Image (spheres, grey):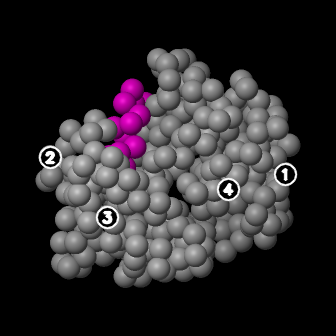
Amino acid sequence: MKICIVGAGALGSLFGGLLARAGMAVWLYNPSNVAHVHAIQRDGVCIERDAEIITVAVPATTTPDALADADLVGIFVKAHQTGRALEQIAPKLNPRSWVLSLQNGVGMEAEILRFVSPERFLRGVTSQGATLVGPGRVRWAGVGPTVLGRWSGPPTPEIDAIIALLRSAGIETDYSGEVERLLWEKLLVNCAINPLTALFERSNGAIVEDPQLREVARAVVCEALRVARAHGVGLGELEAIDRVETVARRTAQNISSMLQDVRRGRPTEIDYINGAVVREGERLGIPTPLNLLLTKLIKERSP
Ligand code: PAF
């Protein structure tokens, strides 16, 4: 199976590197971070985990040509870059490829579905934590489950094969028939961890270690949960809080993707995370003042 990773930043390079290490034919595509691509071409992807360093040779490229005969295309660009990335790859995209998005947030699916049939679209979530620490170098800062499902249609043996290959690469992966619920459950995690760690410049562990941040995070989760219930999330408040805090503990050392973006002066995914809760809350008539406040504060901090 040939796999092409679109948007090989921290998480994309981690997934691509692990799949290549397991013997898959992987291509990493990143048209904007040329220094990262050149470092991988020269030295391979370097995955740092605690004291261990895993170096894997993987072809990397700034052009989308490798997509033409890919069996699986992984979309790892930031939520707000999805439309542009899909427009760039569309001329090379093979209609028979499976397209998998494990992106944070909700709302970018429409951009993917402009070019990908819903039957070939796999959407999922991951709690793996990764940070780009330099060109070609990724810190694997947290291990967590990955769950994916088919946007439209029943599971197929091909999807089972994709899950099996992710597992064989050491990426714990399961199938879900309830993609929407899955996305909104993960959104609860990102709603609390991402903006608070970004605003207070703390690693994920602070969400459980700092009593004040913990209290605010819990209030944000409970508020977002009222909106998430309209999307199939059946968790009680304590369960939802426990999910968020479990991820914060498992990725305690990780610098959240939003803090990474704020530190680099890049746009964040806030519109697809807390901003999505606010928009859905407005539509449903559910007030979301905390999520609105966090959205505004993050927008003050990023372009
Ligand atoms: O966006 C992130 O950083 C990740 O989704 C997560 C799970 C919060 C870990 O840092």
In percent of the image, x 28 and y 71: which residue is there?
Answer: 207
Nearest to N terminus: mark 3 or mark 2: 2
Q: Residues within 10 Å of mark 3 (few under 14, many from 20)?
A: many
Q: Secondary structure at mark 4?
A: loop
- Residue named by callout 1: 63
- Residue 301 or 75: which is nearer the viewer? 301
Label the magenta part by its dominant secondary structure: helix
Q: Would the CB of label 4 be found within 8 Å of ligand 1?
A: no
- Of the two numbered discs 4 and 3 in the rendering, the one whose residue sits closer to the viewer: 3
- Of the two numbered discs 2 and 4 in the rendering, the one whose residue sits closer to the viewer: 2
Is residue 71 found inside the magenta-colored segment of the image?
A: no
Relative to residue 18, is residue 240 drawn left or right?
left
Region rendered in magenta? 174-187
- Residue named by callout 4: 8
- Residue named by callout 3: 291
Nearest to N terminus: mark 3 or mark 1: 1
